[in-house]
């Protein structure tokens, strides 16, 4: 049996964390949340996470600083630039991943 994807949510707004956690739970994804980048770094040392979803604007360590630290300490959490388009926006960091190629029909 495959282990469920472990997701960590990082946002300084507890309501945002709880809302996203509820959406993920409804979709079958277990998740934890933290309210700061510093707390997130501690969490990823204590438990394996496959995905970290982070706010960009937070007091203390912001989302971009968290990303840089995660690149150093947990490189498996950071998608290589060749597989994703990282585009900063006014609302945060948008990550666009390419869709898998559709299966081809063999003739």
Image: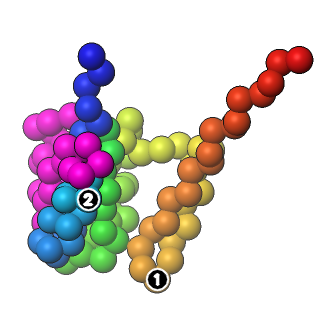
* The N terminus - image quarter: top left
For residue 16, above or below residue 96: below
Horizontal placement of 20 versus 96: left or right?
Answer: left
- Looking at the picture, how far across and down is residue 29, in whole percent? 25, 44
* The C terminus - image quarter: top right
Let me know if residue 86 is in the magenta part: no
Q: Residue at x 38, y 35 (%)?
A: 76
For residue 29, above or below residue 38: above
Mark 1 nearby-residue class (10 Å; few <14, some 14–19, many ≥20): few
Q: What element carries label 1?
A: loop
Mark 2 nearby-residue class (10 Å; few <14, some 14–19, many ≥20): few
Q: What element carries label 2?
A: helix
- Looking at the picture, how far across and down is residue 21, in whole percent? 20, 58
Horizontal placement of 103 versus 66: left or right?
Answer: right
- Looking at the picture, how far across and down is residue 11, in whole percent? 21, 68
Residue 14 can be seen in this image = yes
Q: Which residue is drawn at 42% across and 80% down?
A: 91
Picture quadrant where residue 73 is located? top left
Residue interval drawn in magenta: 25-48
Task: Identify the mark nearer the N-term, 1 or 2.
Answer: 2
Q: Are marks 1 and 2 in contact (CB under 8 Å)?
A: no
Q: Which mark is residue 25?
A: none
Query: How far apart, in angstroms, are the residues tagged by discs 1 and 2?
Result: 24 Å
Q: Which residue is drawn at 71% across and 29% down?
A: 103
Disc number lying in front (1 or 2): 2
Residue beneath label 1, please? 90
Residue beneath label 2, please? 23
- Looking at the picture, how far across and down is residue 82, in whole percent? 62, 44
């Amino acid at each position: 049996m495959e282990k469920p994807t472990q997701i960590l949510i990082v946002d300084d707004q507890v309501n945002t964390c709880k809302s996203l956690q509820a959406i993920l739970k409804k979709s079958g994804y277990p998740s934890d949340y933290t309210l700061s980048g510093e707390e997130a770094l501690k969490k990823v040392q204590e438990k394996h996470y496959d995905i970290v979803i982070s706010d960009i604007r937070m007091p203390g360590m912001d989302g971009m600083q968290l990303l840089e630290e995660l690149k150093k300490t947990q490189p498996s959490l950071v998608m290589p630039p060749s597989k994703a388009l990282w585009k900063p926006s006014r609302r945060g960091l948008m990550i666009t991943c390419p869709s898998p190629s559709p299966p081809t029909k063999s003739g």
